[in-house]
Image (spheres, rainbow, N blue to C red):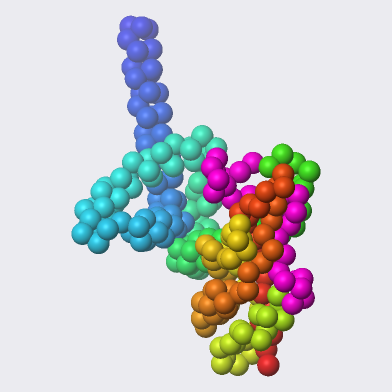
Amino acid sequence: MKKVFLSIAFVLIAQMTMAQEANFKADVLKLISISGADGAMKVAKLKFLNIIPENKKENFSKEFEASLPSMYEKMAKVYMEIYTPEDIKGMIAFYESPVGKKMSEKSGELTQKAMKAGQEWGKELQVIMEKYKDVNSVQVPTSVSDNTVYNTAGIEVKPDFPGGMDQFYKFIAENYQTPKAEGLKGKIYVTFVIEKDGSLSDIKVLRDIGYGTGKEAIRVLKLSPKWSPGEQNGQKVRCTYSLPISIGAK
């Protein structure tokens, strides 16, 4: 009789544990839903759709949506490893409050804007890094042919504009047509390759301030006189060059 009682007790305990786990998981999935995870997934979906061919977007969307339950299950497992049931209930209470609901509603917009801010900062950092690279470090080319593109910071003779950089910025000022926008002010970050013959190629805008400022920078750089090319081991080489162009309000 005692053994039967113990067996029943173990079964009841197991059932209670399973029920508690199920309730815990249900709370976690609820938290994931009300905390704005859906908004973040929508942002991710839009980013992917931008690179999917038009005729395949509908099928991609269906498969993307079908994959989300599996993603949320994996997220739930992580939450359950880190937080207690009481933690989850506390977070649910917060997200059901007015402030929590606002955070959830704005999560997609916040994610999108935060990503954009991070991308812009990354572009600025790329320009800054160009100034502080170790010029004595071993040069690692981006390819292994006569068309190797070197980093300007790592070559023996740097490329230069005729008359120096003061003349370069004078050339920019004389040719750049600032868009007619009130209070327009800021910096345009550009990068380009200085070819062996001193001409500029692969001109790109890393960041601009809108109103066509980036396109105008490209137009002007295409008009640039030939530079004195960079040199490595006594040979003219192709090299990258990055710099900011300041646009001041007039």
- Magenta extent: 140-167
Residue 134 seen in this snapshot: yes
Q: Is residue 153 magenta?
A: yes
Residue 99 against residue 132 in the figure, above or below: below
- How many callouts does the rendering have? 0
User: Which residue is nearer to you in this view: 77 or 199?
Assistant: 199
Side of 222 relative to 68 (left or right): right
Residue at image point 25% right, 48% down: 63
Residue 194 screen position, x and y as percent = 61, 61
User: Which residue is nearer to you in this view: 136 or 36?
Assistant: 136
Side of 158 relative to 191 (left or right): right
Residue at image point 70% right, 75% down: 168
User: Which residue is nearer to you in this view: 125 or 44?
Assistant: 125
Residue 23 seen in this snapshot: no
User: Which residue is nearer to you in this view: 8 or 217?
Assistant: 217
Residue 139 screen position, x and y as percent = 68, 42
Residue at image point 34% right, 20% down: 11
Quarter-of-image position of residue 57: bottom left
Quarter-of-image position of residue 73: top left
Q: Is residue 148 magenta?
A: yes
